[in-house]
Amino acid sequence: MLSYHFVCPAKYRRVVFSADVEKTLKEVCLEISKRYDIAFIEIGTDLDHVHFLIQGVPMESPTKIIRTVKSITAKEIFKMHPEVKLKLWGGEFWSKGYYVNTSGSALLTDKAL
C-alpha cells in the first residue's frame, strides 16, 4: 500500500470545520474505508482545510482516491449539517484543487547513491 498526504481546503477557504463537522467528517471517512481500498491513518482539521494521511492500493491513482473522499464527504456533510451550506454557495464543499505528496520513511545510509 502507498501512503499519501493530502491537504484539501474548503471552498473559498471558508471556516466550516467546527467540532461537529469534524466529527461527521471522521465518521464518514471510517465508512469510506469499509467500502473502498482506502485506509485513513490520520485526519487533521484546521478551520478551513483538512490534512488526510491515507493509504491506498497502488492500482488507484491519488486523483481517484481524493475524488472519492471529497465527493462522499461533501454529500454527507451537507446532508447532516445544513448550516454549512449557508457559509458556502454554488453547492460545492471542497475547493477544486488539493495538495498531494507521497508519505513514508526513507532509510539513509553513509553510502552515496
Image (cartoon, rainbow, N blue to C red):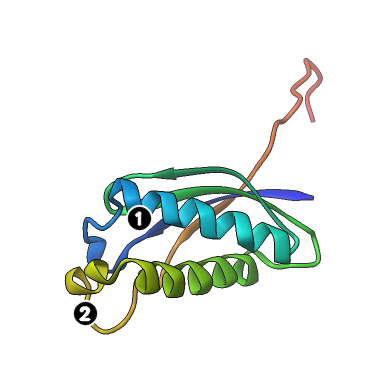
Residue 84 marker: none
The reply, left or right, for residue 21 in relation to residue 13 is: right
Q: Measuring 55% from the left and 66% from the top, which residue is drawn there? A: 69
Q: Position of residue 67 (x, y in %)?
A: 55, 72
Please tell me whether residue 88 is drawn above or below residue 106 in the rendered image: below
Picture quadrant where residue 89 is located: bottom left
Q: Relative to the observer, which residue lies in front, 74 or 82?
A: 82
| Placement of 100 over or under 97, stated as above or below | above
Residue 21's disc number: 1
Asked whether, in this view, residue 24 is left or right of residue 49, the answer is right
* Snapshot quadrant of residue 104: top right
Residue for badge 2: 89
Percent across and percent down for residue 55 are: 69, 50
Q: Among all residues in the image, which is located at the extreme front?
A: 80
Query: SS at mark 2?
Result: loop
Q: Taking 82 as reference, is 54 left or right?
A: right
Residue at image position (81%, 19%) is 111
For mark 1, does the 10 Å Cα neighbourhood hold few (<14), some (14 to 19), or many (20 or more) residues?
some
- Left or right side of 108 for 7: left
Q: Amino acid at mark 2?
A: Trp
Q: Position of residue 45 (x, y in %)?
A: 38, 46
Amino acid bearing label 1: Val
